[in-house]
Image (cartoon, rainbow, N blue to C red):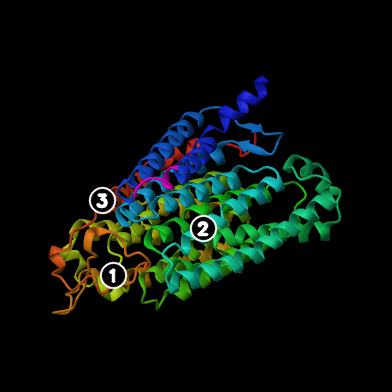
Amino acid sequence: MPAGDAISLAALAPEIIVALAAVVILLLGSWLPRRRQHLSRWIALAAVGAALILSVARTSRPAEVTAAATFTIDTSLSTTRLAVLAGTAVVLVLAGGRFGGHKRESEFYVLLLLGALGTLVLAGASDLLVLGAGYLLASIPLYALVGFAKDSAGTEAMLKYYLMGALFGVLLLVGITVLFGVGGSTTYAGLTRTLPNAPAGAAAVGLLAVAAGLLFKAGAVPAHFWVPDAIDGTTGPAAAFISTIPKIGALVALFRLSSLTGVPTAWPLILALLAALTMTLGNLAAFFQARVLRLLSYSTISQVGYLLMVTAAVGHSELALPSLLFYLLGYTVTNLGAFAVVCAFPTLRTLDDYRGFFRRHRWLALSLIFCLFGLIGTPPTAVFVGKLTAFTAALDAGFGWLVVLALINSVASVFYYLRWIYLLFQSSPSGKAIERVDRGGAEPEAAGDAETDEGGPVDPDAVPVPWSARSAVILSIVSVCFGLSANPVLAFLLVSPLP
């Protein structure tokens, strides 16, 4: 084997480990008895942990382009690896508390690993064909995740998600074809040389079509329609994954695409307008949501709007890349912290169900409060620093109007987050069945998050809290510590995205 190939395999070790783990678990789960399916979870956690360790070790090495200049391993990918792998590990823990003993438990972990792998491919792609492959790998397993419970709500959500994904997937492939036609290459290095001399109109159409696919993965306007239905219709762990992990790879991929030489001069303005629409629509739609998962789904749309501000500043602010990466890290920790609480109590479907939650589960309530304040962007949380640097990058790029709009949206978001926090301290109605427990601790076969007749009203104080809920406390602490240590992290991230 040539030395260059060996170096490439070593550099791609985290992705290779995740892919092999998915294959091993798929084969192992086909013959493991139901009571032994938990072994698959431990294999998945071990693989993700090993990949995470290798990713941390790789962060200090120089950037590298491998696989015939189709995959770039740099600061952007290294940070994406940390966020995606750590986030996937958290979701595996949450899923273990929810799907332990389920006869298709191994399948759930396989789908998670494949979705994480596709996200990593999206983030590292420096070739349009690899980008297309990453899009499919980050999409198809997630369709199955959404409909995993096989209930009516999950099936409907899966169909909506799939149809939207197919539409924007076709647009992405059309964009790849157009860019190859006008640029004569699919690699980003080749397009950087040829796009400046290509027909401007055709290049703009191709870039917009490719960007449409990435906006779908991120859950941004105008490709956001699937988000509330998919998140509200699926199980808690799947909702936590699809609302957090795929958008990391999509936004890093959009950043790389926007960094190409020869993009239309109006490209930053287009992204700025999309950012404005996304954050405003997400906030307005979240105002009067009564269901917890729908509120979090519109919250995640609004967060994508703030993140898109940074992509609009590409090439105009040296703070753009570190701002994007730091924000993604902070958002991953904070959003998964909020979902960890929601996953621990799947039958609490509405905000009103959380009345008196602070009295019953004080530490989890405090963790949820810290995470919700973090999503608002309250100091000293990580998202606060992410928003601050994003606003600074947008100002450097000349988008002062966008910063003003983002500030207004941030203040407006306080309303719907505080609605939830306020109810945590209210007294619950007497005699109301606030929590139900499934017998045996396992999720019903095809009921998803729905309540079943197997469980009955019980004393809320006697409801056992899943062990996986402890991750909410850890994540809320990490969010605050991450915000307090922002300066050294940002200094480390202040590196060019390309070698």
Residue 429 in percent (x, y) is at: 17, 79
Question: Which residue type does callout 3 highlight?
Answer: Arg
Q: Earlier in the sequence, mark 1 or mark 2?
A: 2
Which residue position holds label 1?
348
Query: What span is colored magenta in the figure?
Result: 28-33
Q: Earlier in the sequence, mark 3 or mark 1?
A: 1
Cα separation between marks 3 and 1:
18 Å
Name the residue nearer the viewer: 147 or 219. Answer: 147
Query: In the rendered image, which quarter is residue 440 located in?
Result: bottom left
The label nearer to you, 3 versus 2, is 2
Residue 411 in percent (x, y) is at: 42, 68
Query: Relative to residue 126, is residue 303 drawn left or right?
Result: left
Identify the residue at image location x=35%, y=53%. Answer: 95
Residue 468 in percent (x, y) is at: 28, 51
Label annotation for residue 470: 3
Check if residue 287 falls in the magenta segment: no
Name the residue nearer the viewer: 126 or 458. Answer: 458
Label annotation for residue 142: 2
